[in-house]
Amino acid sequence: MSAPLENLAQPVLEVGLELSPAAWIMITGSVTNVACALVGCFLVLRGMSLMGDALSHAVLPGLVVALLIFDSTSIGPMFLGAVAVGLLTTFLTQTLKQYGQVPGDAAMGVVFTSLFALGVVLVKLFVKDLHFDFACVYEGSLELVPFAEPVWGVPRQFVTSAAVLLLNVAVLLLLWKELKLSSFDPNLATTIGFSATAMHYLLMVLVAVTAVASFEAVGSILVVAMLIVPAATAHLLSDRLWLMVLLSAGVGVASAVLGYYLAEWSNTNIAGMMTVVAGGLYGTAALFSPRYGVLSVVVRNLQVALRVLREDLLAMLYRIEELGSEQRLTPAGAREAVGGGWLAHWSLSSLVRTGRITRAGSQLQLTDQGRDAARQLVRSHRLWETYLVEQLGMPLDHVHEPAHRVEHFIDERLRQELQAELDDRGQDPHGRAIPE
Amino acid sequence: MISLTLSEKVMIGTALLGGMAGVVGSFAVLRRRSLVGDMLAHAALPGICLAFLVMHSRDFLGLSLGALASGLLGVGLVTIMIRWTRTKEDAAIGIVLSTFFGLGVVLLSKIQDPAIGGNKAGLDSFLFGEPGNMLNRDLVLLAIVAAAMLLLVALLFKEFKLVCFDSDFAQSQGWPTLRLDLTMMAALAVVTIVGLPIVGVVLMAAMIIMPAATARFWTNRLHLLVMLACALGVTAGVVGTKLGHALPAGAAIVLTAAAMFLISLLLGLQRGVVWSALAEFRLRRRMANEHLLRSLYELSEPRLPDLDLLSIDQLRSDRHWRPWALERLLHKAEQGGLIDREKSSVRLTPLGLHRSATLTKTHRLWEMYLMQHANIAPDHVDRDADDVEHLLPESLLLELERQLAAEGRLPQIVDEVPESPHELPSTSGSAEGDRA
């Protein structure tokens, strides 16, 4: 599986592009990663991410049989073996699901482990003389890419990977809308008149071919990772398929380049490090993606919670003023009234800081600015209560709670619409004035 | 101590492993988590490497604990990803699987580094399995783990059952589904990790899935499923090891399990393909016969009570028969004494008239029901009539019959038809008296 080690010391590329070995490693890694990421997007969207893992194991018997028939390890027979096994695995998995009522994941597990075991047995029985290094299969040999025999003046692995990348790009461009539709709505696709099943098989063949083409250069583990991780990362960042595909390609390239430098720096396996970098990029996206990241969601929720607390505080002070009593809230009392805790503390101090509330001695008082904001809020609340009673016929004692929740999300335009709908009524159903 | 030969030790070890993998695998397969075993097996690698780097020894227990820690971390991450991000289960499993394994590869290359002073020999057997290395104390460990797993499953059987079949219901009833789920996955992790050094990564995944998926073809009852999966796992271990003298042991075990899966897929009593295909064939044949009889009745209907000769061409234009299928049906009907044949014409016998009239009545009652009670458009109701009498209440049937009779479309069933077809000579003319 690996190039002779004595080649390592010699400069190889006499013709063609003059690039440093490091550049060739990164370029070959990038090309392979992008080729995997492109088809990976559709796997992830279809919920079949683990098909990459399954196929990369299941191709073993196909490769062995191809080797036995054609007596060569060149790429042509290997592709044939890969395509055959890709189709076979897909067919068997589908058949087990459909006729054996085996759950999809179990069907996949049964098929790929059986085929892999069959491959191991075939290797043992028929290819005794072949040096079969398991580690080489999963780790790949990116380190050796610049020193492989050149084809057309560039490393052989690069040629293979580039060919597969071109194939994948071509299929994606030609069958873009078919792939898109059959990924999101296979039934509609079949109704419209092209077979979602055919698309499924096509995709599986692409995965198998891509995996086999990439094995020698980057190893199975990076292939499996690149079929899933860039696509899942891009899925966290975008809701548009074309953008997702482009982003996943970007993640593939970034993993290759960053992975190479980190591996050089720490003197470790390159393909393994590229996988780790891809995982790190996914983790970053999972935390910080603007829309779907865990931290973004937490921050957004926190912001809303704080705004609601601030507005509740303002509205409370306004209502106390409205009652005309001389009694004023103390800061502690106000915090207590909105549930207490550090969130309440934080909200109150931010209101004081922005000049909506002043402290007069130990008592709280609305400023003019604060009173304006509070008036709008109370107006929203009472308009909504009136609307619920008058237009939806809800009982009087059931309207405060919903209005209390929705008041924070009613803007000026909606207030005007409510006002118009309610014939400019001046009072809410409890008999209190709706402030202007 | 008892002294055992190596092959006896290996056999007992694989049998124990197969048995407990079958038990915990049953729940994993039912919970649609079949591939978590695969993920755990891959995710164990960085833990093994870290344990080695920390301890500088290949102590089995230490490495296993490292593997268990990283496996559990992987399960935890998958759970978090599913709950907190938009990444789906399959992609989450794939991401953890590949990234962890990549990290393991990086650590392995670090361990190989002469500066660190280790080599990875011995760690490899954790990935690819080496049953020949089994020691007495490994057997003791396997036995302890197997006993612990049995105890756990026995204690939490009801809870696991509930979570497997209806986790939403379990949650609504106040069961801690998340904790139960994690317990189940932890049990899976323990079994996977003690099995890794014996059968290797891929084949361990197979041991989890195959016995359970095989047992599923034989029973719908959980306790039987678990026991059967356990027995199948033991069998796979024992038989596989026996075959394993000539073949790689892990692969032989998986192929044994695969063979049992295949047999069960075909012959399994609950979901076997052969039985369901046979049932479907019988249903199709019955439906074809009934279609023929109804066509014959409808063609004879205008001239009843006289039974006319009907040409086969007439029949053929009534329905889209394939010529050979029609020929076979007619032959069967003639043998059953339902029709008489004269060259290219047929005629219903009185017995045939009775049968076909019953069928047509059933069909028309069903049509009537669909139009009146299910609001199906009249041009959509011509479905295959089935035994409508069994589906509808008696009162409704009488009402339907009354309406059909009022429209003059109620088929008259001749009462004097002889009961048994076998006592009848199948010649025409015997029915002359009945028709009068």
Image (cartoon, coloured by chain):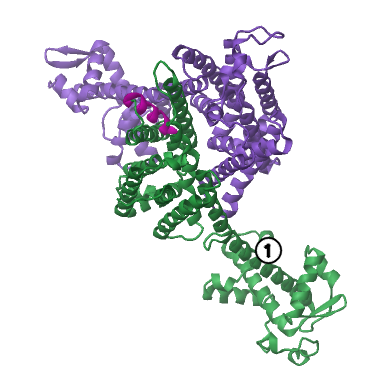
Characterize the magenta stretch by its predominant secondary structure: helix
Q: Which residue range is magenta in the image?
A: B42-55
Can residue B65 be seen? yes
Which residue sits furthest right?
B343
Can residue A290 be seen? no
Q: Nearer the viewer, residue B130 or B72?
A: B130
| Image quadrant assignment for residue A127 | top right
Q: Which residue is mark 1?
A: B382
Q: Is residue B43 magenta?
A: yes
Kind of residue at disc 1: Asp
Q: Height in image: A139 above or below A102?
A: above
Q: Nearer the viewer, residue B381 or A273?
A: A273
Q: Quadrant of the C terminus of chain B?
A: bottom right
Residue A203 location (% of width, % of height): 64, 35
Query: On the rendered structure, is B93 left or right of A169?
Result: left
**Chain A hue?**
purple
Query: On the rendered structure, is B303 left or right of B274?
Result: right
Q: Secondary structure at mark 1?
A: loop
Tell me how many marks there are.
Answer: 1
**Chain B hue?**
green
Residue B241 location (% of width, % of height): 48, 50
| Image quadrant assignment for residue B376 | bottom right
Residue A72 location (% of width, % of height): 71, 31
Q: Residue at x 26, y 33 (%)?
A: A431
Q: Residue at x 68, y 68 (%)?
A: B285
Q: Height in image: A335 above or below B135?
A: above
Q: Is residue B393 magenta?
A: no
Q: Nearer the viewer, residue B328 or B153?
A: B153
Q: Height in image: A408 above or below B247?
A: above
Query: On the rendered structure, is A190 left or right of B15?
Result: right
Q: Nearer the viewer, residue B211 or A307?
A: B211
